[in-house]
Image: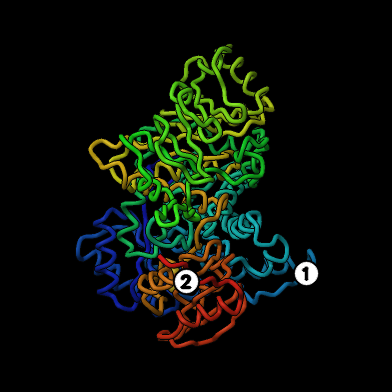
């Protein structure tokens, strides 16, 4: 792993580790699906010891895939597991420390004393790993940082990095290097910043980087879980960072593998990425990749400035557009009242080929190619799209308030004199919005370099990105948009997105609905525009005390209209409360048939019977003024 080896895919079992047969069979399903490493939880000595039976049975059946023991809180279990399996994962937030959520001020001497305590407790494990040739993951989680780290760094990306570095320094001092690190968070923004920062700090302190395991933790299920994972993991892979990946879904673990494979498939044959780890570490960019800061731009209509990124729905492939088509992008028409209802995820613009023959909702505008725009009767509702040559032509009629200008990275004049001329003209035009696109394999880096160009030239026009996909499956397209747009949004660059698809033989209308949903999902995952409820649900593991998939579906069914509310659904009380990070409400398994409900990190209702726990959650949302009555369908 690492040093240019192919990126490995992995997952984690959800069975009870003491149930040898169930764990072996689930591991086999994962391996058959393509998992190259299988992680199994070992919460105590008993489970750690049972790893031997699991390993023996797998080897007996002809499977030699490396196994990883997942450890939290129990050094004793780690020391047993390290003699059995190929790798142990420790969480530096809870390997030695028991989290008490205490705010303590540490003096330098007290802090050093704590590190010494960690050294004492961690050294035996390192020595066992060295002796047995066992690898180790130092796996930091945003939600489970120790009180010591929290008191000095807060729950920041820097805190996550330092948490791992404390353990890494000890391991290095013992000349142990079979290490991989991770910096997981359920928030892709924090996760991306933490990994980048870790690379920078390893390079600065050691002059070398250890391999990295990438993952967005508690990503949830379905479309949202896939988007969040692809945004976080894909952004880093585009940077050239990452050696093994896990897509953490609240679904059966073998279902994570095809998503992993779709993500890494994008990098086959792309040995040369434009940004390498070490280049990032030099920090010579006109923006910081370690913190979120939106690129400064002026407002043109509702685009740029402090406006949330807009969504442009591409309806140009529809032969005829009717009111019904607008339902797919968030607008529903009531013929009785002759009124439009606008959903939370309603596109702001549509792009099509000619003026429409019906009245549009008040908030929706239409983008037409310049030629068609000239024929549009209403120049307020309809705005033009120019290609670069048309825009440079001074004789073309323009909109008085909003003009879109296409710049394709591969437009061969971009880098030469006319490109400079084009940018100078745009810079002086307070009605111009740039539309960047690139069809190359390195499209994300191409567009990022164009944004860097805008920063260097102090061009403040808003800029949106146009991202096309010709991927064969829905999952591949979803990953494509998530990586290309997500990465740019996490760097604070985009003022809007427009996703297009080369449909082939597929029916166009259902795809438009899907693309609109993906666009809003990506904006939500990057926390740049909130339009839905946010679910943070753990993937479940051998500690899980209830059917997480079924419960998540139940909770989703009754709360999906609560825009912006973050609800965590966690399988166990041991790790759940710590790892639900910035959730507003938590639904956490606390014993067989028992649920404990949280408001932020505070326990509000303890040991509620699971049959009534969803109703109690609704009551809690009501008591906390976070509930709204769902509108009639
Ligand atoms: S929170 Fe979920 S995945 Fe994490 S240890 Fe508990 S049950 Fe397992």
Vertical placement of residue 148 versus 435, above or below: below
Query: Which quadrant does ligand 1 occupy?
Result: bottom left
Query: Looking at the image, which is closer to me, 133 or 403?
Result: 403
Lower sequence index among marks 1 and 2: 1
- Relative horizontal placement of residue 121, taking residue 67 as reference (left or right): right
Looking at the image, which residue is at 57% across and 58% down? Answer: 171
Judging by the rendered image, the residue that carries numbered circle 2 is 569
Query: Looking at the image, which is closer to me, 83 or 17?
Result: 17
What kind of element bears circle 1? loop
Q: Residues within 10 Å of mark 2 (few under 14, many from 20)?
A: many
Residue 169, image x, y percentages: 62, 55
Q: CA distance from mark 1 to mark 2?
A: 32 Å
State which quarter of the image contains the C terminus. bottom left
Judging by the rendered image, the residue that carries numbered circle 1 is 105
Q: In this view, which residue lies farthest toward the left? A: 61
| Picture mark count | 2
Residue 450 visible? The answer is no
Mark 1 or mark 2, which is nearer to you?
Answer: 2
What kind of element bears circle 2? strand
Looking at the image, which residue is at 53% across and 25% down? Answer: 405
Quarter-of-image position of residue 21 = bottom left
Query: Looking at the image, which is closer to me, 436 or 600?
Result: 436
Looking at the image, which residue is at 72% across and 66% down? Answer: 151
Q: Residues within 10 Å of mark 1 (few under 14, many from 20)?
A: few
Vertical placement of residue 97 versus 499, above or below: below
- Relative horizontal placement of residue 556, taking residue 105 as reference (left or right): left
Looking at the image, which residue is at 47% across and 46% down? Answer: 242
Quarter-of-image position of residue 433 = top right
């Amino acid at each position: 792993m690492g040093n240019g080896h192919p990126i490995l895919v992995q997952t984690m079992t959800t069975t009870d580790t003491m149930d040898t047969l169930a764990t072996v069979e689930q591991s086999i399903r994962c391996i058959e699906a393509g998992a190259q490493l299988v992680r199994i939880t070992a919460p105590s000595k008993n489970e750690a010891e049972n790893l031997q039976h699991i390993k023996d049975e797998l080897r007996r059946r002809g499977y030699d895939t490396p196994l990883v023991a997942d450890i939290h809180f129990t050094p004793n279990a780690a020391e047993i597991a390290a003699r059995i399996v190929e790798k142990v994962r420790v969480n530096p937030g809870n390997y030695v420390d028991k989290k008490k959520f205490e705010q303590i001020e540490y003096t330098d001497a007290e802090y050093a004393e704590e590190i010494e305590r960690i050294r004492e407790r961690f050294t035996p494990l390192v020595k066992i790993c060295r002796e047995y040739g066992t690898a180790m993951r130092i796996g930091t989680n945003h939600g489970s940082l120790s009180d010591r780290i929290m008191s000095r760094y807060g729950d920041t990306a820097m805190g996550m990095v330092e948490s791992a570095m404390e353990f890494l320094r000890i391991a290095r001092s013992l000349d142990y290097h079979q290490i991989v690190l991770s910096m997981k968070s359920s928030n892709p923004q924090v996760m991306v910043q933490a990994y980048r920062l870790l690379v920078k700090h390893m390079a600065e302190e050691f002059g070398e980087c250890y391999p990295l395991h990438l993952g967005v933790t508690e990503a949830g299920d379905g479309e949202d879980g896939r988007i969040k994972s692809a945004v976080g993991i894909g952004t880093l892979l585009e940077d050239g960072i990452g050696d093994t990946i896990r897509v953490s879904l609240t679904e059966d673990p073998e279902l994570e593998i095809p998503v992993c494979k779709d993500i890494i498939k994008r990098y086959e044959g792309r040995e040369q990425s434009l940004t390498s780890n070490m280049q990032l570490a030099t920090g010579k960019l006109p923006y910081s990749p370690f913190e979120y800061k939106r690129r400064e731009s002026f407002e043109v209509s509702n685009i740029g400035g402090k406006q949330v990124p807009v969504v442009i729905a591409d309806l140009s492939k529809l032969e005829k557009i009717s009111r019904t088509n607008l339902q797919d992008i968030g607008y529903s028409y009531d013929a009785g009242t002759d009124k439009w209802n606008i959903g939370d995820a309603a596109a702001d613009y549509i792009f099509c080929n000619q003026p429409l023959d019906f009245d549009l909702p008040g908030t929706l505008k239409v983008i037409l190619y310049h030629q068609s725009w000239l024929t549009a009767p209403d120049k307020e509702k309809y705005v033009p799209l120019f290609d670069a040559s048309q825009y440079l032509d001074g004789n073309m009629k323009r909109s008085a308030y909003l003009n879109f200008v296409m710049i394709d990275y591969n437009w061969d004049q971009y880098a030469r004199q006319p490109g400079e001329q084009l940018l100078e003209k745009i810079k002086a035009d307070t009605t111009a919005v740039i539309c960047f696109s690139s069809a190359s394999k390195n499209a994300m880096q191409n567009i990022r370099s164009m944004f860097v160009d805008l920063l260097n030239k102090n061009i403040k026009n808003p800029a949106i990105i146009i991202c096309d996909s010709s991927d064969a499956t829905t999952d591949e397209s979803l990953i494509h948009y998530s990586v290309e747009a997500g990465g740019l949004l996490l760097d604070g660059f985009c003022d809007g997105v427009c996703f297009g698809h080369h449909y082939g033989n597929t029916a166009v209308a259902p795809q438009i609905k899907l693309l609109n949903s993906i666009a809003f999902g990506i904006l939500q995952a990057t926390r740049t525009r909130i339009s839905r409820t946010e679910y943070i649900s753990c993937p479940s593991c051998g500690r899980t005390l209830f059917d997480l998939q079924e419960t998540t579906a139940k909770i989703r069914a009754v709360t999906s209209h609560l825009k912006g509310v973050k609800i965590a659904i966690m399988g166990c009380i041991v790790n759940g409360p710590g790892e639900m990070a910035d959730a507003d409400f938590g639904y956490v398994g606390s014993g067989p048939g028992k649920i404990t409900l949280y408001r932020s990190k505070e326990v509000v209702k303890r040991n509620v019977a699971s049959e009534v726990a969803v109703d109690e959650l609704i009551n809690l949302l009501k008591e906390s003024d976070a509930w709204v009555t769902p509108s009639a369908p």
